[in-house]
Amino acid sequence: MSSRVSRSGMAVVALALAVVALSAREFRAMWRTDEIRPGPGVTRVGRLSDAQPALAGTPGDTAVYTLAAPPGAPPGGTALVLGGTHADEPAGYLAAVVLVETAIVTAGRLIVIPRANASGFTYNVPQEAHPQRFEVPTPRGPRVFTFGARATNPVHQWPDPQVYTHRGSGQALSGAETRNLNRAYPGRADGSLTERIAFAITLLVRDERVDLAIDLHEAAPEYPVVNTIVAHERATELAALVNVNLSGSGITIGLEPSPKTLHGLSHREWGDATPALAVLMETANPAQGRLRGRTDAGLVVTGRDRYFLAAARRRRLNVPFDENGWPLDLRVARHLAGVTQFVSDLGMFDESKGIAVTGVPAYEDIVANGVGAYLR
């Protein structure tokens, strides 16, 4: 009897070890960085650690792409575009990738960080049943991108405190927010990894004399602030002009003020700590919603979900929702339309800050052809 029990126990242990090995392999697979293929407009590929050397060699360091006008062109202003603040919001990340791979700047300068919190791309949240990656079809075969998590990987920053206290303001939030990059600005040089990432980005905004800073996000369809521009008070006039121009071209979008009493957010702290005009843009991502059904790569890409459709019929959502859902192509198209409109309208307020960008696919073209048609 003891021999049979021993053999059964060994079999259970062997099975457990096999499961652990398989899980570890899948976990480690997310540590591979997605390939981003710089287009002809990229004049420099640097690192966030160029702004804050102490970040070098850490999981928070990430690529920074500069697209500058050629010598002799009008000097113009500088705009920063951030994607990947939250790695489970793929439209912002993919819009930044499209800028890197397609945009050509003929006046001024564009700085793009597609993976603002690189650590967030190294894992996802098991309880959410999220896919690890998704595919975007292109004429030359699919491109694969990571679907990460909202916050810094706990392997890179642990443990979470019971209460996260934002330094400088004393604001108290849930302990898990200590790993949320968009609650960490303006950051600290001697803080947690997330705070050090935020500090490096704030330094970059200041040291590169960024005139306009845009943070690209996504939100659940039932979330109140969705399909919206959130603007610091100094950027309100510019954001209002962009809102009118986008709406006039058929892209309905809201406009919200940056809350003065909620600290740590990019638009609030960049606007307070630097001369930049700071805004954030949200699109509607069903994969983030709490009403969703099966959460797989299909939901991430197609944005179609029968439970959200039922919720829309009961008027439980803050965006229109029909059988077409909210596909990734549409969400990326909205972000790129917003970025190009902001960059275009910036020069209307100060001609010396004008930025001219060509090569970025138009909203209608992305919706018609898919974002994959414009990836290198």
Image (tube, rainbow, N blue to C red):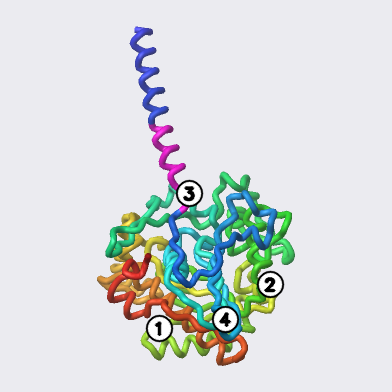
Q: How far apart in space, not on screen, are marks 1 and 2 (Cα)?
A: 32 Å
Residue at the far front: name it. 72
Residue at the far left: name it. 323
Residue 150 locus on image (x, y percent): 50, 57
91 sits to left or right of 83:
left
Disc 4 vs disc 2: which is toward the camera?
4
Residue 140 part of the magenta segment? no
Q: What kind of residue is marked 4?
A: Gly
In the rendered image, which residue does mark 3 sit on? Answer: 123
Q: Residue at x 36, y 14 (%)?
A: 7
Q: Earlier in the sequence, mark 4 or mark 2?
A: 4
Task: Name above or below for residue 175 compared with residue 239.
Answer: above
Disc 2 vs disc 3: which is toward the camera?
2
Q: How far apart in space, not on screen, are marks 3 and 1 (Cα)?
A: 34 Å
In the rendered image, which residue does mark 2 sit on? Answer: 206
Task: Name above or below for residue 25 compared with residue 338.
Answer: above
Residue 248 placement: quadrant: bottom left
Disc 4 vs disc 3: which is toward the camera?
4
Residue 178 locus on image (x, y percent): 62, 55
Helix or strand or loop: what does disc 2 sit on? helix
In the rendered image, which residue does mark 4 sit on? Answer: 108
Q: What kind of residue is marked 1?
A: Thr
In the rendered image, which residue does mark 1 sit on? Answer: 252
- Magenta residues span 19-33
- Please identify the dominant SS of the magenta region: helix
Helix or strand or loop: what does disc 3 sit on? loop
* Other residues around mark 2 within 10 Å, as few (<14) / some (14–19) / many (≥20): some
